[in-house]
Image: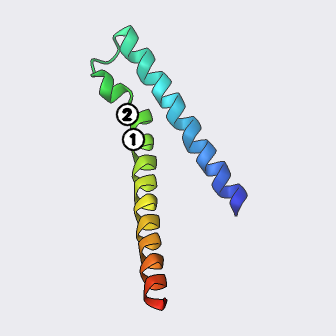
């Protein structure tokens, strides 16, 4: 199971990198008239998702630490 998830994550990353390269080449050659923000979306969106997951994890860990602190204070 871990091998399948690792393979799929590598495949998605590879496809996004290819898409990013295609968009950059098209932008530089005049094939598309998009803003650079749209060209770099295959890079920006996954980074945004990772940041959101990390922030959610940090918030849940902070809440857990606060909860453990409250429990230990009540026990003493």
Q: What element carries label 2?
A: helix
* Among the 4 quarters of the image, the one containing residue 63: bottom left
Which residue is pictured at 27% across the width and 17% down the height? 33
Q: Is residue 72 above or below residue 3?
A: below
Q: Residues within 10 Å of mark 1 (few under 14, many from 20)?
A: few
13 relative to 3 in the view: left or right? left
Residue 41 numbered tag: 2
For the residue pair 74 and 26, the one nearer the viewer reads as: 74
Query: What SS does tag 1 mark?
Result: helix
Residue 67 higher or lower than 56, as above or below: below
Judged from this view, the residue extending furthest toward the top is 29
Front in this rendered view, residue 53 or 30: 53
Q: Where is residue 75 in the image (x, y as percent from the top left)?
A: 48, 90
Residue at left offset 39%, top offset 28%: 40
Q: Mark 1 — residue? A: 45
Residues at marks 2 and 1 touching, judged by CB atoms closer than 8 Å? yes
Instruction: Indicate left or right for 36 with 50 as reference.
Output: left
Quarter of the image for residue 15 reads: top right
Locate the N terminus and report the quarter of the image it occupies. Answer: bottom right
Alpha-carbon neighbours of circle 2 within 10 Å: few (<14), some, or many (≥20)? some
Task: Give the image location of residue 55, x and y in percent.
Answer: 40, 54
């Amino acid at each position: 199971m871990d091998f399948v998830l690792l393979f799929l994550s590598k495949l998605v990353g590879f496809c996004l990198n290819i898409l990013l390269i295609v968009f950059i080449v098209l932008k530089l050659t005049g094939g598309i008239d998009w803003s650079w923000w749209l060209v770099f979306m295959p890079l920006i969106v996954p980074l945004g998702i990772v940041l959101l997951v990390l922030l959610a994890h940090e918030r849940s860990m902070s809440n857990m630490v606060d909860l453990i602190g409250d429990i230990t204070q009540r026990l003493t």
